[in-house]
């Protein structure tokens, strides 16, 4: 048992004992209940388009996905969310990032309880991730915003805010103690999971705690490839075994009805052991049985804060919050294996050109880490006048970070004397670089101020919301001993990079009827470069160079959205059209020549295999539409549907953007009674015909996949819920377009069948709430 989990178990015992000895006491309606309109996390609810008090803080066109949907549709991760929750959200296994409206990587702001998760990349060795460090079993709701806005730091198009469970979610109606336990099996990766959340009062009703612990263990996500065995022709997934552990502790203390202190601590660990059969034996560089990779993702966070909520329905200052936090995230992988002797070593007796290396034991340990601390605060209130009602919001975000990257390794590459000929092509050792940093140590500072004011009149039928945001950032790089071991260190540029921008936006809304609203908005987004884009330095003289660009400009978006929201919880929907233009869009692997503006004269003659870099694209456009509808056919039957479509191009080259997913729609029909229910969900996507390089890119065919889920709550056991599902019911072979690598990527040599999605599989899980 790891140290964080040993500590967790000890804390659990102390809190449980404290709760058991506490006297039961009455409690008023909790803030989270007032915000969500629920008294129990088991209560059924649907995806809403704005609605209650919490949702009213979100802009028009936003959706809120509640816990009941996450549970009943077996949404346990990002990919499930895109298949059975919201078609506008995609998750790419290639970039390991969330994708909204064609934007991915760190262009989409992903937050947990209002604090952003970093998306990490080392820029060269394939280490990416950070957004997967979330246990979906510990969520109470997911807020999805499709467009950039004043309250979003570092987002070009979209915001996803994951809300975790709070003590009040498990303590309705003044209960002094509550519990929520889940356990289940997933046939897609043969995994078992157990999650438990406990909450209670400590000392008195004003002090509450929650502890959530999760554990999951499984194997490789199955695909529908047929060829097994060893070598590059293998289509089946490589055997693997992963373990996921998470823990979260929350404490809250009500000083008064209006003032609350909060503290939370989170830890997440994910480890995956892979037996890489696809790169063993035959035409590969590794002996059979000797090439394994251990992947890891980790995140730790501490948060302290203060909440204010006015007791009045209308007040100049109605609510506010302050959060101070520390966070550390990292992704890494450790490879070990036995390499074969390169066959070119036997062309000339004695291997005078040194082609036989490396051989024998081989190891690499690559990592990238970001740690930092920040402050975020938001406030809002209402100032009515005789003719106009003003609802204002304002906030401040600040974050100070340090990013480090390193590669350690072991091989038997000899020192090659300068000028030694390479008549049979590049030597393998020439292309290997380790025991160094490809990115220097980078310190970053980002901060933003924003404010908006919704001015409404005629009983709220008309509203206009102007907003303004100021963003600023500064990056500085420091050479370290590890970076000095980089053979390109003498050619590296460590200039600081900074920028700032004022981003305005405005929105008009008209409510012609009680259950109808039309809106149009226009605004700007702003996203700063990351450390790898600025300072990556990978390669070696005599071969090639992949380099960052310290002169990169921040990406800027401007766009409009026209939409409508209709109906209520029983029958309603939404429709939105958007058109976004991007300036200084950061592109990677751009080929540089001495004529390029980004060319460094020191590179001349050093890299015969070429130089590639990050560079700003001048003009990019993405436009599309989203729609959603839901309805109750009668007290038992209901149906819903959602659609997302986008089209994106580089306006200078005319090429399509590979980050834009094809049209996708989800249709669900369900039946529910008091103690049981079932739902059928069809997820369909159009063929991907718009790719950047039609001659080389795999164009994923269209598909339609049916999933069935059912639940049962036995009347004899209060709080128990049994659920089961069959997914990809008709065992359809299909590809998710964003999970297939682009042409020329490192993993493009794998057979395309190895990127297929899981075939027919089942899940079963139990939930008990006390």
Image (spheres, grey):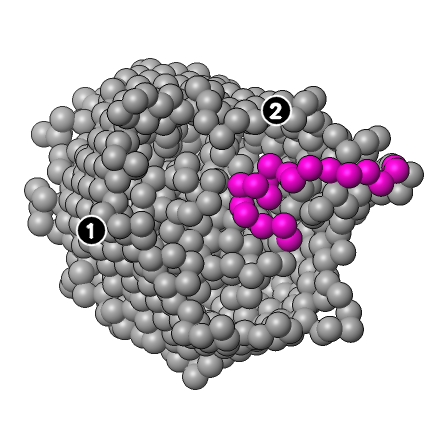
Quarter-of-image position of residue 684: bottom left
Q: Nearer the viewer, residue 573 or 134?
A: 573
Q: Secondary structure at mark 1?
A: strand
Mark seen at residue 577:
1
- Where residue 552 sits, quadrant-wise, is top left
Query: In this view, which residue lies farthest toward the front?
Result: 386
Residue tagged 2:
258
**Residue 135 vs residue 238, the one in the foreground:** 135
Residue 118, compared with residue 283, is above or below; it is above
The residue drawn where x is 42% and y is 58% is: 569
Please tell me whether residue 29 belongs to the stretch shown in magenta.
Answer: yes
Location of residue 244 in the rendering, given as x and y in whole percent from the top left corner? 64, 52
Q: Is residue 29 at least partly visible in the picture?
A: yes
Disc 2 crowd, CA 10 A, few/some/many (<14, 14-19, 20+): few
On screen, residue 398 above or below 518: above
* Segment colored magenta: 22-40
Residue closer to the observer: 119 or 376 = 376
């Amino acid at each position: 048992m790891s140290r964080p989990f040993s500590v967790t178990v000890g804390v659990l015992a102390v809190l449980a004992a404290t709760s058991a000895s506490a006297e039961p006491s009455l409690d008023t309606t909790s803030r989270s209940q007032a915000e969500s309109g629920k008294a129990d996390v088991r209560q059924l609810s649907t995806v809403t388009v704005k609605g209650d008090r919490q949702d009213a803080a979100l802009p028009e066109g936003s959706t809120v996905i509640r816990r009941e949907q996450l549970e009943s549709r077996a949404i346990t991760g990002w990919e499930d969310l895109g298949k059975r929750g919201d078609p506008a959200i995609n998750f790419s296994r290639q970039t390991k990032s969330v994708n909204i409206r064609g934007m991915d990587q760190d262009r989409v702001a992903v937050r947990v309880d209002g604090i952003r998760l970093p998306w990490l990349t080392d820029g060269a060795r394939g280490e990416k991730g950070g957004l997967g460090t979330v246990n979906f079993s510990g969520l109470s709701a997911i807020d999805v915003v499709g467009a950039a806005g004043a309250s979003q730091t570092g987002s070009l198009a979209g915001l996803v805010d994951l809300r975790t469970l709070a003590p009040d979610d498990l303590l309705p109606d003044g209960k002094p103690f509550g519990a929520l336990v889940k356990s289940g099996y997933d046939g897609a990766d043969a995994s078992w999971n157990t999650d438990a959340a406990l909450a209670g009062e400590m000392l008195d009703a004003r002090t509450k705690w929650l502890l959530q612990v999760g554990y999951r263990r499984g194997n490789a996500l199955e695909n529908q490839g047929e060829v097994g065995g060893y070598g590059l022709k293998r289509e089946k997934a490589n055997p693997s075994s992963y373990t996921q552990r998470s823990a979260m502790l929350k404490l809250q203390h009500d000083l008064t009805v209006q003032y609350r202190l909060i503290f939370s601590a989170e830890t997440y660990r994910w480890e995956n052991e892979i037996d890489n059969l696809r790169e063993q034996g035959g035409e590969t560089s590794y002996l059979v049985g000797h090439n394994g990779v251990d992947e890891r993702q980790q995140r730790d966070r501490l948060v302290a804060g203060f909440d204010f909520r006015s007791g009045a329905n209308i007040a100049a200052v109605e609510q506010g919050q302050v959060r101070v936090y520390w966070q550390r995230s990292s992704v890494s992988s450790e490879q070990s294996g036995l390499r074969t002797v390169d066959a070119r070593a036997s062309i000339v007796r004695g291997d005078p050109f040194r082609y036989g290396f490396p051989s024998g034991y081989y190891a690499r340990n690559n990592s990238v880490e970001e740690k930092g601390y920040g402050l975020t605060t938001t406030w809002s209130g209402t100032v009515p006048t005789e003719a106009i009602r003003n609802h204002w919001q304002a906030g401040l975000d600040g974050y100070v970070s340090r990013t480090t990257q390193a590669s350690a390794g072991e091989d038997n590459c000899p020192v090659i004397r300068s000028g030694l000929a390479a008549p049979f092509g590049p030597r393998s050792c020439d292309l290997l670089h380790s025991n160094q940093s490809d990115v220097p140590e980078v310190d970053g500072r980002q901060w933003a101020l924003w404010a908006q004011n919704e001015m409404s009149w005629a009983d709220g039928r008309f509203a206009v919301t102007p907003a303004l945001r100021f963003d600023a950032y500064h990056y500085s790089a420091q050479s370290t001993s590890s970076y000095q071991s980089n053979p390109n260190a003498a050619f590296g540029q460590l200039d600081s990079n900074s920028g700032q921008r004022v981003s305005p936006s405005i929105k008009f809304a008209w409510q012609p009827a009680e259950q109808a609203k039309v809106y149009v908005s226009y605004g700007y987004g702003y996203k700063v470069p990351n450390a790898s884009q600025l300072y990556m330095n990978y390669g070696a003289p005599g071969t090639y160079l992949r380099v960052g660009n310290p002169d990169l400009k921040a990406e800027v978006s401007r766009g409009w959205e026209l939409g409508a929201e209709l109906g209520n919880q029983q029958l309603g929907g939404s429709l939105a059209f958007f058109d976004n233009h991007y300036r200084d869009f950061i592109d990677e692997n751009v080929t540089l020549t001495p004529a390029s503006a980004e060319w460094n004269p020191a590179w001349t003659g050093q890299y015969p295999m070429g130089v590639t870099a990050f560079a700003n694209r001048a003009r990019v456009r993405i436009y599309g539409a989203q729609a959603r509808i839901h309805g109750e056919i009668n007290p038992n039957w209901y149906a819903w549907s959602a659609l997302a479509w986008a089209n994106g191009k580089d306006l200078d080259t005319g090429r399509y953007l590979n980050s834009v997913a094809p049209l996708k729609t989800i249709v669900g029909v369900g039946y529910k009674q008091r103690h049981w229910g079932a739902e059928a969900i069809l997820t369909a996507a159009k063929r991907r015909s718009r790719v950047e390089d039609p001659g080389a890119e795999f164009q994923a065919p269209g598909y339609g996949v049916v999933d069935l889920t059912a639940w049962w709550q036995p009347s004899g056991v209060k709080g128990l819920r049994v659920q089961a599902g069959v997914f990809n019911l008709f065992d359809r072979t299909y590809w998710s377009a964003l999970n297939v690598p682009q042409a020329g990527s490192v993993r493009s040599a794998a057979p395309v069948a190895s990127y297929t999605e899981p075939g027919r599989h089942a899940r079963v899980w139990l939930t008990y709430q006390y």
